Image (spheres, rainbow, N blue to C red):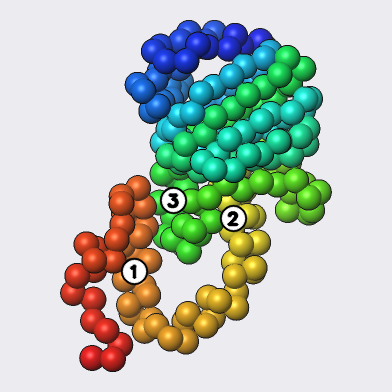
Amino acid sequence: MAEFNAPPSGGQSRFPDGFRILQGKQEYVTYLDHSSIRIWPSDVAAHYDPHRHSAVEIIMPSRGVSLYHVQDDVYRVQPGEILIVPSDCQHALTEPPETQRYLLLFEPTPITGMRDMAELVPMMQRPIYLHDGSETHTQARELLNLTVECYFAREPLWNTQCYSYLMQLYALLGRRYLRSSAQPREMLRRNIDPAIMNSVLTYINEHYMDDISLASSFPACPSRNT
């Protein structure tokens, strides 16, 4: 595994194959040409102050513990576990010297652009911590390992192939999420007109990255009682 020197906080920091660019707490992830996914391997100590970026971040430790502060929560991510930090979510990361991990960053737009992903917006706006050894956890790790292998193999259309694995990952997590929320969703469907629901889901899908509010987005939305 290649070694990556831990960058200092702030400014522009050089990696063997690119830069880490910070402006205050906003990070601008640099990608290889014709791609929108980045995978950083590391087996050296590192610390990253609180920051955010448009990319989704996934960490997979294979040795040691990666300590994440995500907003008000703390995650001690152990070997074999997976933590998915959503887009534009402030987080900090500390890795002691014995830590070895892969860090995946990718732009979520190709995934969120799928129309049926609108139902998964609540799931995608909060961290996902896979650590229970369940079938979902095992399958998720297999898909991420395939993503890593594909990324470093650099075969033709590797970016598209990597996203195919990430699509499968979110389909896997989404099915679990929808099963767990099936009863509340069914109750919601009984009380909301299908046309209104479809309109709302379409709007959320098209304005996923915006600051959405009911008053500003649907000022003319009629009440069911009028």
Q: CA distance from mark 3 to mark 1?
A: 15 Å
**Residue at the spot x=42%, y=39% of the render?**
88
Which residue has dot 3 on it? 112
Residues 11 and 59: in front is 11
Percent coordinates x, y for residue 59 in the rendering: 64, 33
Which residue has dot 1 on it? 200
**Residue at the spot x=47%, y=80% of the render?**
188
Q: Point out the image quarter for the C terminus.
A: bottom left
Graded by Cα atoms within 10 Å as few (under 14), some (14 to 19) or many (20 or more), the crowding at tag 2 reads some
Percent coordinates x, y for residue 125 in the rendering: 48, 51
| Element at label 1 | helix
What's the amino acid at mark 1? Answer: Val
Which callout, 3 or 1, points to the residue nearer the camera? Answer: 1
Percent coordinates x, y for residue 86 in the rendering: 50, 43
Q: Are marks 2 and 3 in contact (CB under 8 Å)?
A: no
The disc, 2 or 1, on the residue closer to the chain's N-terminal end is 2
The disc, 2 or 3, on the residue closer to the chain's N-terminal end is 3
Q: CA distance from mark 2 to mark 3?
A: 11 Å
Q: Point out the image quarter for the N terminus.
A: top right
Residues 35 and 21: in front is 21
Percent coordinates x, y for residue 119 in the rendering: 48, 64
Residue 171: image tag: 2
Judge whether residue 13 can be spotted in this image.
yes
Q: Is residue 155 above or below residue 192?
A: above
What's the amino acid at mark 2? Answer: Ala
What's the amino acid at mark 3? Answer: Thr
